[in-house]
Amino acid sequence: MTIAGIGSRTLAWLLDGLVLGAVLLIVGLASFRTANTDSLLALGLLSMATLLLPLGYLVMMESLNGGRTLGKMAAGIKVVRVTGAPIGFGAAIIRALFLPVDILLFGVGFISVFVSGQSQRIGDFAAGTVVVRDRIRQSKIAPIADPAVYADRPRWDVSAITEEEIGVIRSFLSRASALPSSSRSEYARQLRNRIEPRIGGGEPAMSNEAYLKRVVVEKTRT
């Protein structure tokens, strides 16, 4: 997983803020129109909407839309568990409930994103989540291998491997040379162990990185 930076997260916050601001404006106008002569009722309705709408928006979008709010979708990021698993309803609620703390308590969430190792705000620590990049910029990914090298070899069945998994493999292979040798070997081994049981026709004698490269090539061959 590639951790999302403060720039993309800020963009997502601003876009979500615009969405919520527009919704709250509509709700506010509707509240005063409905309450008509009872300004206290209108104020009460607006106060409830101001509290509940942002929380409901965050929880429903992140739990039902793969960790993505509208702002996160536009910024190309998403929320996942620290293990890489989907965020889930419970973690989405915890993140939403801690948002006022992150925003209002002297900007502690903003500071936390800067200083924590995985750019986590307080809500992320509480929920066990991280914000990661949802889109891999292909222009920054080095070529994996030339498909022509494997043209005369038997095809592998990689239909069970998802595009998301291929993206993770490509991301690792493009950055492998910058990793410490021990970490590089371990990551390659873990990735291979994860996908090998679902591949038909693989060659067990290949090194882990060569195996991963072949999988990417097979997935993109027509």
Image (cartoon, rainbow, N blue to C red):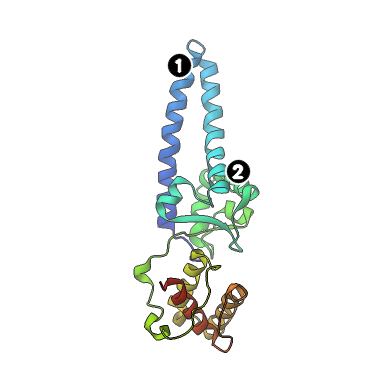
* Mark 1 secondary-structure assignment: helix
Q: Position of residue 2 (x, y in %)?
A: 48, 66
The residue located at (46%, 56%) in the rendering is 77
Q: Is residue 217 above or below residue 123?
A: below
Q: Residue furthest left?
A: 139
Q: Is residue 69 above or below residue 194?
A: above
Q: Position of residue 34 (x, y in %)?
A: 49, 16
Q: Position of residue 40 (x, y in %)?
A: 54, 16
Q: Is residue 179 left or right of residue 129?
A: left
Question: Residue flagged by tag 2: what amino acid is it?
Answer: Leu
The residue located at (47%, 18%) in the rendering is 32
Q: Is residue 24 above or below residue 73?
A: above
Which mark lies nearer to you, 1 or 2? 1
Task: Judge the density around disc 1: few (<14), some (14-19), many (≥20) Cα neighbours within 10 Å.
Answer: few
Task: Using the image as rendered, state which of residue 214 and residue 74 is in the foreground.
Answer: 214
Q: Residue furthest bottom?
A: 205
* Mark 2 secondary-structure assignment: helix
Q: Is residue 109 visible?
A: yes
Q: Which mark is residue 97?
A: 2
Task: Judge the density around disc 2: few (<14), some (14-19), many (≥20) Cα neighbours within 10 Å.
Answer: some
Residue denoted by label 1: 33
Q: Position of residue 120 (x, y in %)?
A: 54, 58
Q: Is residue 100 visible?
A: no
Question: Residue flagged by tag 1: what amino acid is it?
Answer: Arg
Task: Using the image as rendered, state which of residue 28 and residue 105 is in the foreground.
Answer: 28
User: Mark 1–mark 2 contact, CB under 8 Å?
Assistant: no
